[in-house]
Image (cartoon, rainbow, N blue to C red):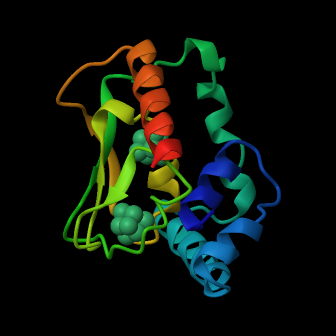
Amino acid sequence: MEGKHVVESMMLGAKICEFSSGTLWRGWSLLRRSAAFLVEYMKEQEYASLDDFRGLGVQYMMPADLIDWGVGRVAAAVDAGKCTGCGICCHNLCWAMSLDGDGDIASCSEELCGACGLCVAVCPENAVTLEAAAHTRTEQQIYAALADAEERALQA
Ligand code: SF4
Ligand code: SF4
């Protein structure tokens, strides 16, 4: 959770936003930065109060099974210029993400990426985006590749 997520949550009707895991990842200054983001956002959009935009996004909501998540057609991409190699998106978070041989930059193994967007959300440098994949994969191929990766890791 950070400033832009506060706005997104309020657009969907939230009256409060919790930062518990966000402060663990990014420290207590996250609260101050998020409040500053919210103030700046409201100034730019000329909103005088939270009620001016709370719930505006509800009209665009739809059942999850009707949404095209792009699974198999998009994959995480790391901006090497922004990545600090902190490893938050790798390690225990996702099989698809790993640091390069020097441990400097993360990269995504496209065949393992299910386009969930978790790495995008947790990266403190905003270095990850979801982009069109070089190769299209079916969900079954992704699950099979993940099972193989898990098996290899267990045997290592
Ligand atoms: S979380 Fe972001 S900065 Fe850290 S390794 Fe992953 S892409 Fe790089
Ligand atoms: S989008 Fe999801 S599956 Fe793909 S690399 Fe990021 S965390 Fe892993």
Which residue in the rendered view is the most extreme toward the front? 155
Res 137 visible: yes
**Left or right placement of residue 21 versus residue 30 in this view:** right
Residue 60, placed above or below residue 154: above
Percent across and percent down for residue 15 are 82, 55
In what quadrant of the picture does the N terminus appear?
bottom right
What residue is rendered at 46% in x and 18% in y? 68
Percent across and percent down for residue 40 are 51, 74
Which residue in the rendered view is the most extreme toward the right? 15
Residue 39, placed above or below residue 150: below
Q: Please tell me which residue lies in front, 42 or 142.
A: 142
Q: Please tell me which residue lies in front, 82 or 105.
A: 105
**Left or right placement of residue 102 versus residue 124 in this view:** left
Percent across and percent down for residue 57 are 62, 37
What residue is rendered at 23% in x and 66% in y? 101
Q: Please tell me which residue lies in front, 90 or 133.
A: 90
Res 19 visible: no
Residue 55, placed above or below residue 86: above
**Left or right placement of residue 119 versus residue 79 in this view:** right
What residue is rendered at 27% in x and 39% in y? 131
Percent across and percent down for residue 76 are 34, 44
